[in-house]
Amino acid sequence: MPGKTTSMRPRFATRALLLHLATVVLVVVLCTGVYLVLAVQQLRADAESTALGIARTLAEDPQVRDEVSRISASDQAPDADALRDGELQRIASGVAARTGALFVVITDDHGIRLAHPTPSRIGEEVSTPYQQVLEGEEIVDWQTGTLGESARAKVPVRDDSGTPVGEVSVGFERAGVFDDLPPLLTLMAATAAGALAIAVLAFLLLRRRWERLTLGVQPEELVALVQNQAAVLNGVDDGVLAVDTRGVVRVSNDASDRLLALDSPVGARLADLDLPQAVLDAVTGAPRASSTVVADRMLYLDSRPVVRDGRSLGRVLIVRDRTDLVALTERLETVRTMTAALRVQRHEFANRMHVVAGLIDADRSSDARAFLGELIGRGSVNFPVAGLELLADPFLHSFLGAKGIEAGERGVALRIAEDTQLIGSVIAAEDVAAVLGNLVDNAVTAAVAGERTPRWVEVAVLGDGDALVVTVSDSGAGLAGVDPLVPGSGRDDDSDRVHGHGLGIPLSREIARRRGGDLWVIDPGGPDGGAVFAARIGGAVDPASTELKERP
């Protein structure tokens, strides 16, 4: 695929270059054509205006007016021979020579030529209409006469009373009108060529900058890249949230929107979004892994800076949902604890059976019977938990018994409070084990870390209808201002936040809340004693099971 992409880039670049050049050429051609049309119209207008000005001037000349009025007033036809050498012919020829006009023609009130560039045509009627002029109108137009097509202006010659008695017609030939057109076309062609050259140069510079900014990725490749990026980002379960250096969200995939409860955050400032403080700290603070609880989900946050060529482009936050993993870890811990308890029971039971077998082999049947009676009286395993007999529920009995063995191995005594009373049976063993096991483990850790001796942890279990209420206290140093309900609070040096460090208490609270209960701190502890936690787990007890079961 990389080789294929590289081979396609020249074709993409050539296609884009040709497209841009074709666009520029089209624009230049259109502009040149429009300018040419305007230039031709301007030349025509200038020729017509010049012809009209000359004709008006000549029609106002006193000699012309007097001579035309005299000839038109005569009843006899104009003498052509006299007119060829007359004053009007002289005036018309002089004006034509000075102005470069194709012709200057003067007629009487019957359209008879009194002056003409071709003397032989004097005395003849003009070849173009003249009636409108004799009615007092001025005509400017392009017409074809005996001298060819020309831009001509016709102006009436008036007598002293203002009555039209003839006309003056001045014309400029087409070739003369457009004498300035070739140089103009040359200038326009040079301008168009210069515009094309500048356009090509500008495109090459822009193309070079574009490729530098896009790392050589062509437009078609950008489209495919964006499509692939969207498919990949929205196809993973981890959330991806990218923020630039100004704190504006630039990328947020579907998983990030779902886990952080965001609604179209792209383009919004991070500070304006309703995000937990832990998320804001993860994005804006030092790069590190952290965790938080959003709604009922336990999220693992990993913030990393994005740097290119030594310049910071922003931060990328990876959001992973660890709720199921942490919950599974807590349940596995419960299974491990129960397995350890069963292993202890099996080992203890095997030892006692060896004792009974030895007594029987020694023919001490009475001692064996007495030993078995003692076992029936105090149970199969003697867990090192004071007050454990107050718990009739077999699950809690075995679970806290196993926890007592673990605590004892760490030098901590686990005991059951005297006010413990539970009527019924635990029916939500997994949730109870997750919440109670986490509280007990944290309490044991706090007792071990504390300086008070002896080290102990006390558990009280109460039933409230179908809810299970537990309190756990310890001999540790207390919370010391740390809020354990905030994931990772005060534990920046923890190396494993996913497997119980900094996540267990918030997760346990969410488990309790999902069952209609809660988890809270009764006493943060201090110089006089350790911390006291409480949890209420709704629907965890079957109160209908009122019969008290004998201790195992």
Image (cartoon, rainbow, N blue to C red):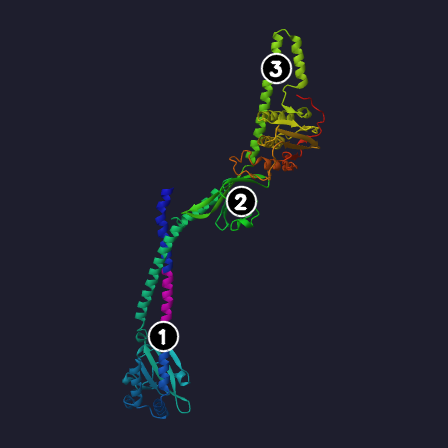
Residue 352 shows which numbered tag? 3
**Alpha carbon separation for disc pair 3 and 2:** 58 Å
Disc 1: which residue: 44
Amino acid at dot 1: Arg
Where is residue 412 drawn, in percent x and y?
A: 60, 27
> Callout 3: few (<14), some (14-19), or many (20+) C-alpha neighbours within 10 Å?
some
Q: Position of residue 433 (x, y in %)?
A: 61, 30
Quadrant containing the N terminus in the rendered view: top left
Q: Mark 2 points at which residue?
A: 281
Q: Which amino acid is tagged 3?
A: Arg
Residue at image position (59%, 22%) is: 342
Specify the segment rendered in magenta.
25-45
- Foreground of the two, 17 or 46: 17
Q: How far apart are marks 1 and 3 (CA)?
A: 128 Å
Q: How many labels does the image show?
A: 3
State which tag comes first along the sequence, 1 or 3: 1
Q: Which amino acid type is marked by label 2? A: Asp
